[in-house]
Image (tube, rainbow, N blue to C red):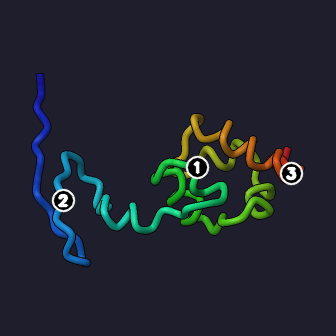
Amino acid sequence: MKTKKISLRICKKGHKYSKSSDCPVCPICEAEHKPESGFLSLLSAPARRALEGNGITSLNRLSEFSEKEILKFHGLGRASLPVLNKALKGVKLSFRK
């Protein structure tokens, strides 16, 4: 059984944190960046970054994409689709067909 090597890191803002993966994201900075409301606040950090990185910060913009296109974004998986569908339905929108 492989054991993961945990390394101590310091981000650009000076936060100290431990990581066992190659992911460069500081969990402290990420927590500070998480929105308190809106559909993006309901998603995991990787899914939120995937949408934001592709310019999707509103439900209107999200509705311009199909589910298939959204799933191609790195960091966004099938588990996010029910959350996104519910948010879109709440404002009478849907994914593009």
| Residue type, label 1 | Leu
The residue wearing badge 1 is 42
Viewer-nearest of labels 1 and 3? 1
The residue located at (89%, 50%) in the rendering is 92
Q: In which quarter of the image is residue 13?
A: bottom left
> Sequence-wise, which precedes: disc 3 or disc 2?
2
Q: Which mark is residue 28?
A: none
**Label 1 neighbourhood size at 10 Å, few (<14), some (14-19), many (20+)?**
some
- Left of 57 or right of it: where is 1? left
**Vertical relation: 2 (above or below) 17:** above
Q: Distance between the residues labelled 2 and 1?
A: 24 Å
Q: Kindly state the secondary structure of the residue where label 1 is placed.
A: helix
> Considering the image in quadrants, where does the N terminus appear?
top left
| Residue type, label 3 | Leu
The residue wearing badge 2 is 17
Residue 39, image x and y in percent? 66, 55
| Residue type, label 2 | Tyr
Q: Distance between the residues labelled 1 and 3?
A: 17 Å
Residue 38, image x and y in percent? 66, 59
Q: Depth check: 66 or 16 in front?
A: 16
**Label 3 neighbourhood size at 10 Å, few (<14), some (14-19), many (20+)?**
some
Residue 34, image x and y in percent? 48, 62
Residue 9, image x and y in percent? 15, 63
Q: Depth check: 93 or 96 in front?
A: 93
> Sequence-wise, which precedes: disc 1 or disc 3?
1
Residue placed furthest toward the front = 36
- Look at the numbered discs 3 and 2 and tell me whether their residues touch, using CB distance below 8 Å: no
Q: Distance between the residues labelled 3 and 2?
A: 40 Å
The residue wearing badge 3 is 93
